[in-house]
Image (cartoon, rainbow, N blue to C red):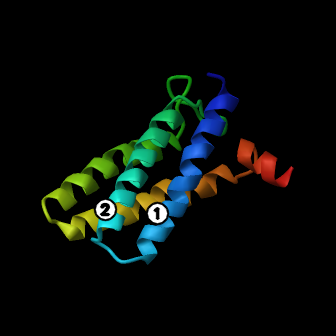
């Protein structure tokens, strides 16, 4: 896949993940609907994190000729989702909530903020 195709795939999964996560954070917790939608959100985050690992860093230093600092957020997401899943399976609501809020802030808000930095593709698309 080309970088542009990967970008579209990434945006096509991260956008619904953002809206689902925002909805889940604002609504009641523990309901059957929350659990079903949470699984969709977790699946989207895993998928989009894997996709992002195939996208080479376009801004800043590269490691191994491909990875940049922003890829650390993908790794954090790949760790946070299973941590949150297994925490809630054990009934550990506190750790589940911490992992999910951390994923939302780090994986969506901070990473999303980085995509709007000058020199990044999304910045060019939005701001010209």
Where residue 35 sits, quadrant-wise, is bottom left
Relative to 33, does residue 121 appear above or below in the rendering?
A: above
For image coordinates 26% across by 63% down, the residue present is 96
Can you identify the residue that label 2 sits on? 35
Mark 1: give few (<14), some (14-19) or many (20+) Cα within 10 Å.
many
For image coordinates 35% across by 53% down, the residue present is 39
For image coordinates 66% across by 35% down, the residue present is 58
Residue 127 lies left or right of residue 70; in this view the side is right
* Residues at circles 1 and 2 in contact by the CB criterion of under 8 Å: no
Label 1 SS: helix
- In which quadrant will I find the N terminus? top right
Viewer-side label of 1, 2: 2
Q: x%, y% of residue 76?
A: 38, 48
Q: Closest to the observer: 106 or 31?
A: 31
Q: Closest to the observer: 15 or 99?
A: 15
Can you identify the residue that label 1 sits on? 21
Residue 14 lies left or right of residue 2; in this view the side is left
Q: Closest to the observer: 61 or 107?
A: 107
Q: x%, y% of residue 19?
A: 54, 62
Earlier-in-chain disc, 1 versus 2: 1
């Amino acid at each position: 896949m080309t970088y542009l195709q990967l970008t579209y795939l990434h945006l096509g999964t991260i956008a619904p993940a953002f809206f689902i996560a925002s909805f889940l954070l604002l609504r009641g917790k523990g309901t059957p609907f929350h659990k079903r939608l949470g699984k969709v959100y977790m699946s989207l985050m895993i998928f989009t994190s894997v996709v992002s690992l195939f996208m080479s860093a376009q801004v800043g230093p590269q490691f191994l000729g491909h990875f940049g600092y922003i890829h650390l957020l993908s790794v954090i997401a790949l760790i946070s989702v299973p941590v949150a899943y297994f925490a809630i399976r054990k009934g550990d609501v506190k750790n589940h909530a911490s992992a999910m809020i951390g994923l939302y802030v780090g994986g969506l808000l901070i990473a999303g903020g980085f995509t709007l930095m000058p020199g990044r593709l999304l910045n060019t698309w939005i701001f010209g």
